[in-house]
Image (tube, helix red, strand yellow):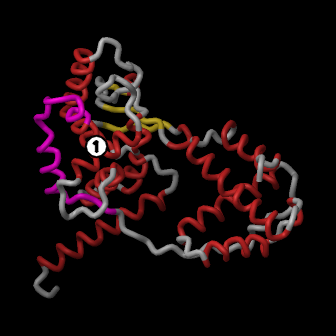
Amino acid sequence: MSSIPEQIQSFIDYLKFEKRYSVHTVTSYQNDLIAFFDYLDLQFGKLSLQEITAGFIRSWLAGMKDAEMSSKSINRKISTLRSFFKYQLKTGKMEMSPTANIIAPKIGKRLPVFIKEEDTKLLLRSVSGITEDWRSLNGKMLLTLFYSTGMRLSELINLKEKQLDFGRSQIKVLGKGNKERVIPVSKEVITIIRDYQQWKKREFEKPEEEVLLITERGKKMYPKYAYLLVKQYLGEIKTLDKKSPHILRHTFATHLMNSGADLNAVKELLGHSSLASTQVYTHNTIEKLKDVHKKAHPKA
């Protein structure tokens, strides 16, 4: 497909300018739709929107299933098609969505990987006194802020100085869909941020003041830099299979839940749009309760 068809382009523009989705999300939608319409062109020839039926969609999905694509990925593509055809209904291009009778494959729930509390304490203690070089300072900042706030990688590297409110001990975070949320932070975290800011002023004549986190070259931190640095520090935890910034977000949420935090409060802190996304952390809490029961109850 040499160019994006008008019906896809208008939907992409709607996601960009009306829904204000992130570049990453819009690109995912676009790639899914181009792949779907490429498939239709190749297998069935040019079809109008009104000619697309559930049968054509099932045929596309079956091909992906045969290619052993994961249920999670297939469900994302179904979600893309549902959103696309819903938009066509909204704009009057179609009268019925061909996705109405499409059943998404079930996904086995995987519990979020997280770091045990004792390992987290050791990890943060290992970076607590770091002032050796700029990369080490960044490692300290990343570990501290990811674990203390539960922010996503994109949220943290885009965090601006003006979003810090030291007077109220809180940080304003701009999340998915440009939704703003407020995360409280401790005095200890504020001290670490202030020290970082002082180092930044001393090290760089004209750092990129707008963002909080910068590289040793004084430029805005980029995703791969943060990812690899966090992975390096998490490499010290031998029991951890996955080593990424998102593990610290999972750890933030799991530790809150294990300490009795309200589910809705955790949802707000994480910036989840649905409570269902947060409920996965209750499973880890239940697993902890089972473990306590097994060790402590005489009849367990």
Residue for point 12% across, 44% down? 126
Q: Position of residue 131 (x, y in %)?
A: 14, 29
> Among all residues in the image, which is located at the extreme front?
2
Question: Compared to 82, does 192 lie above or below?
Answer: above
Foreground of the two, 34 or 129: 34
**Image: magenta residue range:** 113-138
Question: Compared to 217, does 234 lie above or below?
Answer: below
Question: Compared to 212, does 59 lie above or below?
Answer: below
Q: Main secondary structure of the magenta part?
A: helix
Left-right relation of 101 to 184: right
Foreground of the two, 278 or 16: 16
Residue for point 56% across, 45% down? 24
Secondary structure at badge 1 equals helix
User: Is residue 128 located in the magenta-colored stretch of the structure?
Assistant: yes
Q: What residue type is labelled 1?
A: Leu
- Pick the quarter of the image with the C terminus: bottom left
User: Which residue in the protein does label 1 denote?
Assistant: 229
Q: Position of residue 37 (x, y in %)?
A: 76, 60
Question: Compared to 130, does 259 lie above or below?
Answer: below
